[in-house]
Image (tube, rainbow, N blue to C red):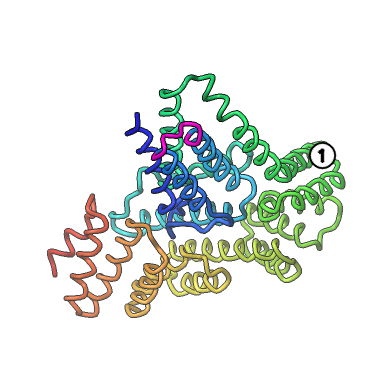
Amino acid sequence: MRGLTAMGVLCLVLSAWLIWIKAPISGGANPSLSFGWLAGVIGGIAAIAWLRSSGSVMAVCGIAGLGVVSFSLLYLTFMDPAFWDLVDENAQATSIVSFSQHFLPGNYGIQPTFHPHLDTDTPVARLVTAAYFMSWGWIICLAGTLLLLVSCLTRTSRRQLMRWISLPAILICGGQALMLGSSVAGEYLQDRGNQQMAVGRFADAARRYERAQRWNPQLARSLRVHLRLGEAYYHLNMRTHPNARLYLGERYAQEGERKAALTEYLVAAREASDPLKALLQKHIAWHYADDGVLLYRKGLFGPAIGYWEQALTTDAAQVQAMYFLSRAYFDQSRYERSITMSRLLLLRSQNPLLNANLQFNTGDCYWRLRDYDKARLAYETSMRLDTYGNFRIYKSLGGT
């Protein structure tokens, strides 16, 4: 059983060097709180306990590691504002896949673990979505803690094991409850606000939503909560409030009146303060990006480029706009600009399939510029990044 314990210790230490939360395009995310170093400390203590054959300390390390794993998931779900950045990036990845499948020859595949549509409407749905973003660091830490607990269970009696871990488990659960208390209160207030909205008590609903955002900073960056708050203000005839303008703009957008929607968003962004202002900037950038796709579908490459450049100016995190621009510049024979934009996106992307497509587009540009050596190099790089079903590469490499 010492071998099983050693594997658990090794997993805990290894998890400290791996990514715990992974974004679909940029790779390793930067949450507001890092958990890897905690896992490393617990792994180090467990290693010392393993060398000294201290079953009680190893059991405590196992339950502590389990606490880190569970809290990291709960923290991302209910407290970390970076959760919405991850959801936004996943939506941009979905948009990039859709664009590639509609407008480019087929070679942009979809990773088996990629989910294009994420649900964030309920706490349980957000928990599932947060688990989707958890990466190898989190998984290996979970495996290590379970191995430690299993090895302790096989070496000691169940009663003795429970005596060792009961107090640490109570302390860990109590600490998590205290830290998550304000977030849970915010979720409760949001739910109460939804109930008040359903019966037409808009003033009470608005107060509930405002209190929910004060209790839980993550809800202060939730588009859904701001829209519900804007709906309440709208029915209270507070239609110049930025939240009400956001809600009204969303109604215009749903009715197909995109220019009227954009006007409301822009006015709201000028009048709002953070975090609503930052959220509106992202929303406006998405509006520009979507308008650009609509124009590109009609063959209007110039106007589409204008909208995508506005999207990137409005929100620097608009990686989808960078991808669209790299292709649209190529369509306009602006090959140097296309190469520059592709390189900028390659610096930000850790997604191998996206990078393979960017390398292919770069190769196309060099081919048109008659720089065949660089074109071949780009095509070969694309092939190394995406070796399965990269059909565009087979034809292109044959010509270089």
- Magenta stretch: includes residue 53: yes
Mark 1, secondary structure of its residue:
helix
User: What residue sits 59% from the left and 45% below the top?
Assistant: 77
State which quarter of the image contains the N terminus: top left
Side (left or right) of 6 relative to 219 = left
Say which amino acid is labelled 1: Gln
| Predominant secondary structure, magenta span | helix
Location of residue 19 with respect to 57 vertically, above or below? below
Q: In front: 357, or 28?
A: 28
Side (left or right) of 99 relative to 165 = left
Q: Residues within 10 Å of mark 1 (few under 14, many from 20)?
A: some
State which quarter of the image contains the C terminus: bottom left
Location of residue 159 with respect to 331 vertically, above or below? above
Q: In front: 342, or 128?
A: 128
Side (left or right) of 17 relative to 217 = left
Q: In front: 390, or 50?
A: 50
User: What residue sits 86% from the left and 41% below the top?
Assistant: 201
- Residue 378 in picture, x, y percent from top left: 24, 69
- Residue 39 in picture, x, y percent from top left: 48, 47
Q: Which segment is the magenta one?
A: 51-58
User: What residue sits 44% from the left and 70% below the top?
Assistant: 300
Side (left or right) of 60 relative to 47 = right
Give the residue at mark 1: 196
Numbered marks: total: 1
- Residue 372 in picture, x, y percent from top left: 17, 76
- Residue 352 in picture, x, y percent from top left: 33, 57
- Magenta stretch: includes residue 217: no
